[in-house]
Image (cartoon, rainbow, N blue to C red):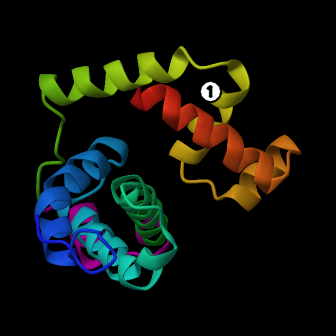
Amino acid sequence: MPKTADSSPSLAALYADLAPQLERIVSANVRAPSTVLEEACQAAWTWLLTERESLIPGTELGWLATTATREALRLVRTQHRDISLEQEQEEEGELLEVIFEPGPEQVMEVRERLAEVRQLPPRQHRLVMLQGFGYRYSEISEVTGESCRTIDRQLLRARRKLAG
């Protein structure tokens, strides 16, 4: 993998390595049309251009997955607010497209991930689940009453446990 002067991988190499994983993670976390998932992933990659210098090398996939998942959830919420032409056609009785159903491999992968999360201490489990639902640190803080710094530390500990 080509490296830049600061010893981090080039963006092109990073994209080649992480793009397929990012799409799998986001599609496993958010049930949405592929166009929404692609748009969310591309938005995350775009935001990475401005945020990359502030990230710890090696944490790009986690950052991208979180950002893309949140963006996909935001896009899904926006879709439900706006009536689309497809929805109008569907209501008039025209069949548009079959909603994607996950395959057995994807279902098993999600179940395994959830089993790992359930093994975390209750506090970390709750915070990981809230973050998984797309809540930002400030929103989690409102729900739990904990500071954003505490949330950040607990989620970091949870990620370390889940990674290793």
Residue in the image at 36% along x and 44% along y: 29
| Residue 148 in view of the camera | yes
Horizontal arrangement in the rendering, residue 5 relative to residue 142 (left or right): left
Question: How many other residues sit within 10 Å of disc 1, few (<14), some (14-19) or many (≥20)?
Answer: some
Q: Which residues are magenta?
A: 79-96
> Where residue 50 appears, x then y in whole percent?
43, 85
> Which residue occupies the foreground of this view, 66 or 94?
66
Horizontal arrangement in the rendering, residue 78 relative to residue 143 (left or right): left
**SS state under label 1:** helix
Q: Is residue 83 above or below residue 63?
A: below
> Which residue occupies the foreground of this view, 78 or 116?
116
| Residue 96 in view of the camera | no
Q: Quadrant of the N terminus?
A: bottom left
> Where residue 150 appears, x then y in whole percent?
79, 46
Horizontal arrangement in the rendering, residue 24 relative to residue 134 (left or right): left
> Where residue 120 appears, x then y in whole percent?
59, 20
Query: Where is mark 1, residue-wise?
Result: 125
Residue in the image at 54% along x and 14% along y: 119
> Which residue occupies the foreground of this view, 54 or 34?
54
Residue in the image at 43% along x and 59% along y: 63
Quarter of the view holding residue 89: bottom left
Q: Amino acid at mark 1?
A: His
Q: Is residue 114 above or below residue 77?
A: above
Q: Residue furthest bottom?
A: 50
Horizontal arrangement in the rendering, residue 4 relative to residue 55 (left or right): left
